[in-house]
Amino acid sequence: MSKFVIAEIPGDGIGPEVVGEARKVLEAVGQVAGISWEWRHFPFGAERVLKTGISVSDEDLDEVAKTDAIMLGALGDPRVSEKLLQTGGVLKTRFHFDQYVNLRPIKLYPGVDSPLKDKKAGDINFYVVRENSEDFYISLGDHFEGDSYRSDIHLDRRLYKASFGIDITVNPPQKMGFHIGALTAQGAERVARYSFELAKRKGMTRVTAVDKVNVLGEMYDIWRESVKKVACEYPGIELEFTLVDAITMFFVRRPEYYQVVVAPNLFGDIITDLAAALVGGMGMAPGGNINPEGGPSMFEPIHGSGPDIAGKGIANPVAAILAGGMMLEHLGEEKAARLLESAVSDVLGAREVRTPDLGGRSSTIQVGDAIAAQVKVLGDRL
């Protein structure tokens, strides 16, 4: 019997509700597949920030490091700065454990309607691999007013004027802000290699790399060079490049074309929300923050904390449950992962038990119960 220690971070809003159902389904899978779980609870989130002023401490991360994987619900609360919860919580955890891959499967399941009315189950089935540690998410930036610099980065006024055509010393003083993106060849190469390995493992033959090289050439020239370098190691897999604005159009016009898409951090974040809308919405969108070399990876539904529906028992738990399936696969339990996904597919395909976002009247708990029960039905047939 396999045994795994999981850091459970329910978080805010609907996070505890959907994580509870994911845990229920994973426990059912464990009973069928011979997997034992030990859950260690971590109370990260808004309530902790309100009480202590801290989201996630270094000592917290030392304890999380002792687990095999992380199951995250959601972080976000109107009472607390979004920057504090995200930068001091989610991003801090990603960077600490060097979870440099953000993997987001985009799949249209049976019984789920796409806004693209001509698409049916199986027509949309691809992966977006988002670089997760560089680009514009490195928190290198600041703001200032007129001549009052707040940043440790000292900008030469003449350089600023030459670059942007704006004189920051004009009277009256004006507020200015900047954020700097940074991308390394090593960072681009390692996420590209993960993308090609994913395509190879899944029997796919095309990788599409996204950027905005026509405007941001200093960074994305390096991106393209690095991805091309890695592609030479995979002669059986086609590489193509597309601009981020173009791929948003192509996702809508021909989503069935895509297999593996790899994108820098910011663009990957944006295009995966669009992609999720094509397959039923954010309640159907799981994600994984992965360090392929080791250390705990973190799995989560990519929706937010949904404060407007928190406590109503109507949140869709499918994304969190599918994130649990991704965690199983990452932990080497591929057969169990397939079992979980089959149970999800069966329940959705029956169109009987579903939350309001999918047009149903079922509660969060009822959906979790139905999927857990189907896991046991499928397990009895093995």
Image (spheres, grey):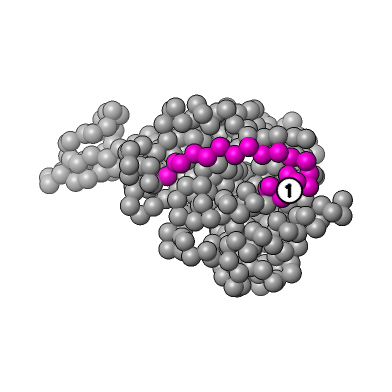
Using residue 211 as the reference point, say whether residue 166 is left or right of it.
left
Q: Position of residue 338 (x, y in %)?
A: 77, 49
Q: Between residues 342 and 134, which one lies in front from this camera angle?
A: 342
Observer-nearest of 42 and 295: 42
Up-down: is 366 above or below 129? below
Q: Position of residue 292 (x, y in %)?
A: 65, 32
Image coords of residue 212 (percent x, y): 51, 45
Q: Is residue 154 above or below residue 54?
A: above
Q: Which of the 4 quarters of the picture holds residue 280? A: bottom right
The residue type indicated by label 1 comes to Val
Q: Is residue 44 magenta?
A: yes
Q: Residue at x 66, y 60 (%)?
A: 369
Q: Residue at x 38, y 46 (%)?
A: 47
On the question of residue 275 being in view, the answer is: no
Count the labels in the image.
Answer: 1
* Magenta span contains residue 15: no
- Left or right position of 339 against 296: right
Stretch of the chain drawn in magenta = 26-45
- Secondary structure category for the residue under label 1: helix
Q: Quadrant of residue 381?
A: bottom right
Quarter placement of the N terminus: top right
Is residue 47 visible in the rendered image? The answer is yes
Q: Residue at x 80, y 58 (%)?
A: 377
Query: Residue, x 51% and y 29% (percent of image)?
Result: 63
Q: Please give the residue where the numbered disc 1 appears in the rendered image.
A: 29
Q: Residue furthest right?
A: 382
Would you place residue 13 above or below residue 135 in this image? below
Q: Nearer the viewer, residue 272 or 338?
A: 338
